[in-house]
Image: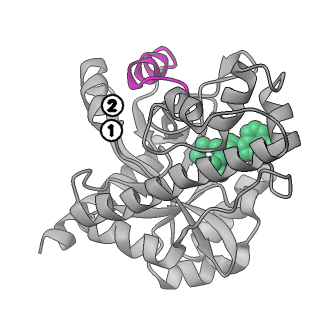
Amino acid sequence: MSYADLHLHSHYSDGTFTPEEIVARGQKQGLGALALTDHDTVEGCALMTIECAKAGIEFVVGTELTSEHKDHELHILAYFVDPQNERLLREIGKFQIVRQERIRDMVAKINALGVPLKAEDVFALANCKSPGRPHVARTLVRHGQCRTLDEAFERFLKKGRPAWVPKAKMSALEAIELIHQAGGLAVLAHPGLNRNDNAIPDLVAAGLDGIECFHTKHPPATSQHYLVLAEKHNLLITGGSDCHGMSKGKPLIGTVRLAREHFEKLKLAAADRRSATLK
Ligand code: AMP
Ligand code: ZN
Ligand code: FE
Ligand code: FE
């Protein structure tokens, strides 16, 4: 039985839906559990908690930490963390500032190419503490500098394009420790996108708890590959759609679902972690 969508973004990072919209859509899809995994922030989790409670849906506090290991970018999902954990908030706060500075750097590069764009307009559109490239792309489209978001990425924002700016990231091993001390579970996000299986033993040695086997961009063979690795390393199995809002006229929420048995195992592991953290 499919049950949970554990990878969702809201307008508190680069998604477009409000928590209310996410929960309404999750309910329509018949989902029993949702996790919010905005990039480098837990800001939307308070509202998600309230909306999920109203809808009778289980809610998991989450965030997706942009991190790196041996010069490769990796995304580490944090689940069941305490959203008020001071160290977690302090650390992700630093990366929110990095993101804001990076927006200014990208805008300066776009301006240097003769294209007018104001950082303040990007911040106004983003209206969140954790802005990213999609907000720059949307502002370029809104101001008529690009016709589509794809064009904005292709002309300016993709890695190697003239307005691409690298992002300072936390170490993946530190991210795992940060999540653990906040009472949560650390999960490697969409490994099929990063294709860096060599990092997995190092992450496991640092205490990685799980691996996102099911993801929108994982074809069945990729999911199967990571299910085998999860078994090999005794890792929990997670899954989610990585919905950022409407995608080609339809939202992704509910199109990737985690079976209830895997979700229940996650909850048990989180309860163990929480009681170990409180000791
Ligand atoms: P950032 O965190 O600022 O590096 O932005 C990453 C976000 O940009 C991710 O959520 C992706 O979904 C989105 N993104 C990355 N590359 C592209 C692309 N070529 N076209 C559209 N969106 C993209
Ligand atoms: Zn995103
Ligand atoms: Fe990601
Ligand atoms: Fe994501």
Left or right, 220 with respect to 36, comes to right
Callout 2, which amino acid?
Met
Across and down, in percent, residue 104 comes to 60, 48
Asked if residue 69 is among those painted magenta in the image, a careful observer would answer no
The residue drawn where x is 60% and y is 40% is: 242
Q: Could you tell me residue 232's position as x and y percent? A: 61, 76
The magenta region covers: 16-29
User: Residue at image x 24%, y 59%?
Assistant: 271
Any part of residue 215 in sight: no
- Label 1 sits on what residue type? Cys
Q: Is residue 193 visible?
A: yes
Q: Which residue is mark 2?
A: 48
Q: Is residue 210 left or right of residue 108?
A: left
Q: How far is the residue under mark 1 from the one under mark 2?
A: 5 Å
The answer to whether residue 91 is above or below residue 264 is below
Above or below, 24 relative to 244: above
- What residue did someone put label 1 on? 45
Q: Residues within 10 Å of mark 1 (few under 14, many from 20)?
A: many
